[in-house]
């Protein structure tokens, strides 16, 4: 089955909406940590996930989490919400099949790919690799579509 251009735009929009919903949920979870002892919360999750507290990486993460200030927690939550707003903007424009939605997605997604690639090179995981590949494919697809789709006709003035 071959997808039409409009169907692929809507599929990308769903992907953007999913990313936005995930960031909103994570950000709200971060804000809930504002008035809690992060060391206790981290230790609870260590036990729940059965992670080895003697592991160097786990211990380093525990130290970093325990030292977060309320201001840093607020900033993390706010950054998540800002990114969610960008993803919602992209998704809305693509869902409505608007040319501006394609352009916004090319600019935002394209500008984040180098950072995602850098993160992949520093700490490679299958998920990071998949995200980089999907985002590069989205940018290439949208640029191809923008270049090969005729401009929308101008609205006639009455």
Image (tube, rainbow, N blue to C red):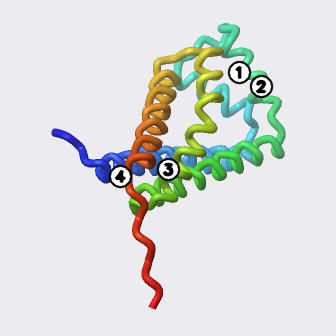
Tag 2–tag 4 contact (CB < 8 Å): no
Answer left or right for 70 relative to 103.
right
Q: CA distance from mark 2 to mark 1?
A: 5 Å
Asked if residue 43 is positioned above or below residue 141 in the image, the reply reads above
Taking the view exactly as shown, the residue that stands out farthest to the bottom is 158
Work out whether mark 3 precedes mark 4 in sequence or the reverse, and give the earlier one.
Answer: 4
- Image quadrant in which you'd find residue 156: bottom left
Q: Which of 119/98 is in front?
A: 98
Q: Which residue is mark 1?
A: 61
Task: Label 4: state its secondary structure.
Answer: helix
Q: Which residue is mark 2?
A: 64
At x 51%, y 27%, the residue is 132
Q: Position of residue 3 (x, y in %)?
A: 24, 44
Work out whether mark 4 precedes mark 1 in sequence or the reverse, and give the earlier one.
Answer: 4
Dot 1 surroundings within 10 Å: few (below 14), some, or many (20 or more)?
few
At x 73%, y 35%, the residue is 38
Work out whether mark 3 precedes mark 1 in sequence or the reverse, and give the earlier one.
Answer: 3
Q: Which of 12/143 is in front?
A: 143
Q: Which residue is mark 4?
A: 10
Task: Label 2: state its secondary structure.
Answer: helix
- Image quadrant in which you'd find residue 39: top right
Q: CA distance from mark 3 to mark 4?
A: 16 Å
Q: Which residue is mark 3?
A: 21
Asked if residue 149 is positioned above or below residue 158 in the image, the reply reads above
Dot 2 surroundings within 10 Å: few (below 14), some, or many (20 or more)?
few
If the image is split into quadrants, where does the N terminus sit? Answer: top left
- Judge depth for marks 2 and 3 and give the one in front: 3
């Amino acid at each position: 089955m071959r997808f039409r251009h409009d169907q692929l735009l809507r599929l990308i929009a769903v992907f953007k909406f999913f990313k936005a919903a995930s960031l909103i949920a994570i950000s709200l979870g971060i804000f809930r940590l504002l008035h809690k002892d992060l060391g206790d919360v981290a230790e609870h999750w260590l036990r729940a996930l059965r992670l080895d507290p003697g592991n160097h990486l786990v211990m380093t993460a525990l130290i970093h989490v325990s030292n977060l200030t309320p201001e840093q927690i607020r900033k993390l939550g706010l950054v998540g919400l800002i990114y969610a707003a960008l993803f919602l903007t992209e998704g809305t424009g693509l869902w409505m099949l608007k040319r501006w939605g394609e352009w916004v997605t090319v600019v935002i997604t394209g500008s984040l790919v180098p950072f995602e690639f850098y993160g992949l090179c520093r700490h490679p995981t299958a998920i990071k690799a998949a995200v980089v590949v999907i985002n590069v494919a989205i940018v290439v697809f949208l640029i191809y579509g923008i270049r090969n789709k005729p401009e929308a006709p101008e609205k006639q003035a009455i």
